[in-house]
Image (tube, rainbow, N blue to C red):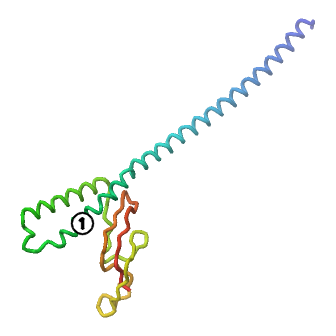
Amino acid sequence: MDKKEEKQNIDIGKLQKDLENCKAKCEEYLSGWKRERADFINHKKEEMERIEIMIKYANEELILKILPILDNICLAESHVPEEFKNNGWIEGFMQIKKQISDFLAKEGIKPIKTIGEKFDPNTMEAVEEIDLAMSDIAKSEDKKNVVVEEIQRGYTLHGKVIRPAKVKVSK
C-alpha cells in the first residue's frame, strides 16, 4: 500500500467518523426540537383552557350587580296582595322577573336549593339558628341542621358559588 492509498483510508475513516458524529448531532437536535414542539403544543392547550375559564367567569362581576335587582323583584312579588295577583300590571312586572331569571340561567347562573336541605357551609351562610324543639319537625334526629328559612338566595355560576345563600338553620 502506498502513501496515497493509506492517506485515502485515513481520510475515509475520518470522514466516516465525522459522518457518524453529524448523524448523532442531527438526532440530538431533532429530539430536542420534537420535545420543544410538544412543550409548545402543551403550553398552547393550557393557555387556551385558561382563556376559556376567564371567558366563562368574565361576567361574574356584572351578574353580582344584577342579583340584588332580582332579589328586590322577588321581595316585591312576595308583598303583592292576593287580590292584585291577576292584575295586568303585576303580571307584566312578573314577566320582567322571568326574563331576568331566564337570562341568568342562559348565562350559567343557577339558584342554590336551600329550604329543607341539610346545611352546607360550602354553599350557605347561617345567619341564625332556630330552636324547633316544640315542633314535630325537630323531634326527628335527621331534621337537625336543616335549612328552615332562606334570607337571601344564593347562586352558582357554572358550578362555582358566586354568592352563598343566607339561611336560618334548625338546632
| Residue 110 horizontal/vertical position (percent) | 31, 61
Which residue is labeled 1 in the image?
Answer: 72
Dot 1 alpha-carbon crowd within 10 angstroms: few under 14, some 14 to 19, many 20 or more: few
Q: Look at the image and tell me in which quarter the N terminus lies.
A: top right
Q: Nearer the viewer, residue 127 or 158?
A: 127
| Residue drawn at point x = 38 percent, y = 84 percent | 144
Specify the quadrant of the image occupied by residue 66: bottom left
| Residue 99 horizontal/vertical position (percent) | 20, 56
138 relative to 44 in the view: left or right: left
Specify the quadrant of the image occupied by residue 93: bottom left
Q: Look at the image and tell me in which quarter the C terminus lies.
A: bottom left
Q: Is residue 67 above or below residue 31?
A: below
Helix, strand or loop for disc 1 = helix
Q: Amino acid at mark 1?
A: Asn
Q: Nearer the viewer, residue 47 or 4?
A: 47
Specify the quadrant of the image occupied by residue 89: bottom left
| Residue drawn at point x = 37 percent, y = 57 percent | 158
For the image shown, how many numbered marks are present on the structure?
1
Residue positioned most to the bottom: 134
| Residue 139 horizontal/vertical position (percent) | 34, 91
Residue positioned most to the right: 2
Q: Nearer the viewer, residue 116 or 104?
A: 104
| Residue 160 horizontal/vertical position (percent) | 40, 60
